[in-house]
Image (cartoon, rainbow, N blue to C red):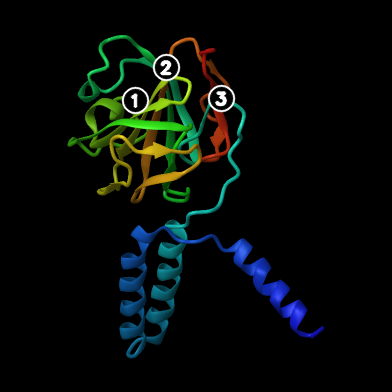
Amino acid sequence: MSSEKPVSHFLELARGMVPPMHPAGRPFVAGAAIATLLVRLRFKRLGVVLALVTAWVAWFFREPKRVTPTRPNIATAPADGTVSHVVDAVPPAELGLGSQPMTRISVFLSVFDVHVQRVPADGEIVQVSYHPGKFLSADLDKASEENERNTVWLRTVNGHDLVVVQIAGLVARRIVCEVSEGEKVAAGQTYGLIRFGSRVDLYVPRGSRVLVEAGQRTIGGETVLAELPEA
């Protein structure tokens, strides 16, 4: 028994170090793995290269577990990445929220970042809207208005309206959103994915205390981006 315990302990540590994969990545990983096996039958060196590519694809679609802060009236980061802008801006027109500006916190995701998106606060989904558009570089400010996007309007348990926007980038060509209108959601819950390089905007009410600045790194589901106004 003593020899089995170190082995089981090692396997448990290994599982903790290797994050699970988002289901949307399974077809890509399976396709890459099959291609690797077929190529390796004839070209061993190229097969090694494709094996590394397969491993990278699996790593790209990782969905690590996160510990989300539980204190009330906060909005956590919907994505891993780097804060590119903190500005006042009108929320996407398709929501019909009017012309009153909100505070927009934009997070840019490189191809090396975790690409799943997470709910910023406990609440209910009011509206989900898809808007076709361009594929400009996601770090440009005008990408918020001109790029392809998927917008989620969330009303928190304290009655605040938050807006999370998944924005396709220069390389990204597929936005996945897995929540629907009327659905109850929890802070830190994974709700979507953008494939390969993108941006996520979080709109919070004016009067919120923003706790991040441009250039700061965020951890989806853990970094507190803003303290919301008192209900």
Badge 3 vs badge 1, beta-carbon distance below 8 Å: no
Residue 42 pos. (x, y %): 32, 90
- Picture disc at residue 94: none
Q: Nearer the viewer, residue 51 or 160?
A: 160
Residue matched to label 1: 141
Q: Nearer the viewer, residue 120 or 14?
A: 120
The residue under label 1 is which amino acid type? Answer: Asp
Q: What is the distance, in whole Å, between disc 2 and disc 3 at their CAs?
A: 12 Å
In the picture, residue 99 is in which quadrant?
Answer: top left
The residue positioned farthest toward the right in the image shown: 2
Q: Secondary structure at mark 1?
A: loop
Residue 190 drawn at (x, y percent): 44, 46
User: Is 190 on the left-hand or right-hand side of 152?
Assistant: right
Residue 193: where, in percent of width, then height?
36, 48
Mark 1 or mark 3, which is nearer the start of the sequence?
1
**Looking at numbered disc 2 in the image, what kind of residue is underneath it?**
Val
Sequence-wise first label, 1 or 2: 2
Dots 1, 2 in contact, CB < 8 A = yes
In the rendered image, residue 112, in percent from the top left (x then y), is placed at 47, 51
